[in-house]
Image: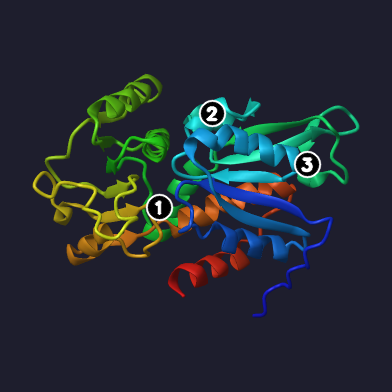
Amino acid sequence: MSEPLTLPIDARTRYCAVYGHPVSHSASPAMQNAGIAALGLNWRYLAFDVRPEELGKAIVGAKAMNFIGLNLTVPHKLLALDMVDSLDDSAKLWGAVNTVRFEARDSNGNWQAVGELAETPAEVRSRGFNTDADAITRAVREDLGLELAGKKVLVLGAGGAGRTAALKLAADGVAELFLVNRTREKAEAVAQEIRRLYPRVKLVLDYPSGPVDLVLNATSLGLKEGDPLPLAERDFSLEAAAAVFDMIYRPAETPLLKRAKAAGCRTANGLGMLLHQGARALDLWTGKRAPLEPMRRALTQNVYG
């Protein structure tokens, strides 16, 4: 199937971008530009390496340059909570921002995505959303065939991604949640939130002593060559896991997934999560349903070649 033609850049071209540090590994530009082309929009999606101390200025700069929106990746998702003008309920609920939509008032005075307005008025605000949480559990269901209600899950990492994952798993009704993080204080802070919001979930800040249905890696270990495994095999054997999901998608097979396959686990990387969080972001920017299949094909080609 031939892909839609990309419109040439001209003076009316509008822009979206992903901010991260690092960001050179990101497959978001390939995915989002494929979706933008399929929708016939005169937009482009770019990637910028933005240091954490420059994030606030970079968001303001994008707003000043009439950008449509932004995606945020490591290490910006928690920092952005205090840097956008307004927070959607999703960002408040999951405590992280991975999507920013720039908005202006329409003729009725209501805030609307600037991507849906023919002209952008002077007054523009940045609004933060979280599209990660739903994408995580959707990818687990689709890629591993695993319904999470009543299951036992080990989450590795309690940073921005780990916190969101743990909260969403608890909201989806897992029976037992094991949370492991390099610094116990950060894991305890996430645990306190879960105990307050989802008291029925059995929560343990340690490795499980028996089998689990899922191990989910929400750390960045595996992103760089030579990284160690994100779990201590002396404390937990992957033979005791039915399935392993790694949020990392590049490399497509991390050392954790390679080890999990050898242990007989069902495995999936973060490609499905990236697809669904990115598609939801495009929905928010355009007011239209994102074209999943062209975006999926572009992602697969970019990551697997």
Q: Secondary structure at mark 2?
A: helix
Horizontal side of residue 102 vs 95, given as left or right: right
**Could you say which is closer to the camera, residue 20 or residue 230?**
20
Quadrant housing residue 235 = top left
- Mark 3 → mark 1, Cα distance in angstroms: 33 Å
Q: Quadrant of the N terminus?
A: bottom right
Q: Quadrant of residue 168?
A: top left
Amino acid type, mark 3 = Val
SS of the residue under disc 1:
helix
Q: Is 123 situated above or below 269?
A: above
Q: Earlier in the sequence, mark 3 or mark 1?
A: 3
Q: Which mark is residue 248?
A: none
x and y percent of residue 123 in the render? Answer: 81, 29
Residue 106 versus residue 264 in the image, above or below: above
* Dot 1 amino acid type: Val
User: Would you call the spot at circle 3 few (<14 residues within 10 Å), some (14-19), or many (20 or more)?
Assistant: many
Chosen colour scheme: rainbow
Figure check: 217 above or below 54: below
Residue at the spot x=60%, y=66% of the render? 293
Label 2 belongs to which residue? 81
Dot 2 or dot 3: first in sequence order is: 2
Q: Is residue 265 visible?
A: no
Locate residue 202 relative to residue 196 in the image: left or right.
left
Could you say whether the residue bearing mark 3 is in a helix, strand or loop? helix
Q: Earlier in the sequence, mark 2 or mark 1?
A: 2
In the picture of the structure, the residue carrying the numbered disc 3 is 114
| Residue at 84%, 57% in the rendered image | 11
Query: Who is closer to the viewer here, 273 or 243?
Result: 273
Kind of residue at badge 2: Leu
Residue 55 lies, in percent from the top left, at: 55, 36
Q: Which residue is mark 1?
A: 140
Report the residue at 70% width, 60% height from top.
36
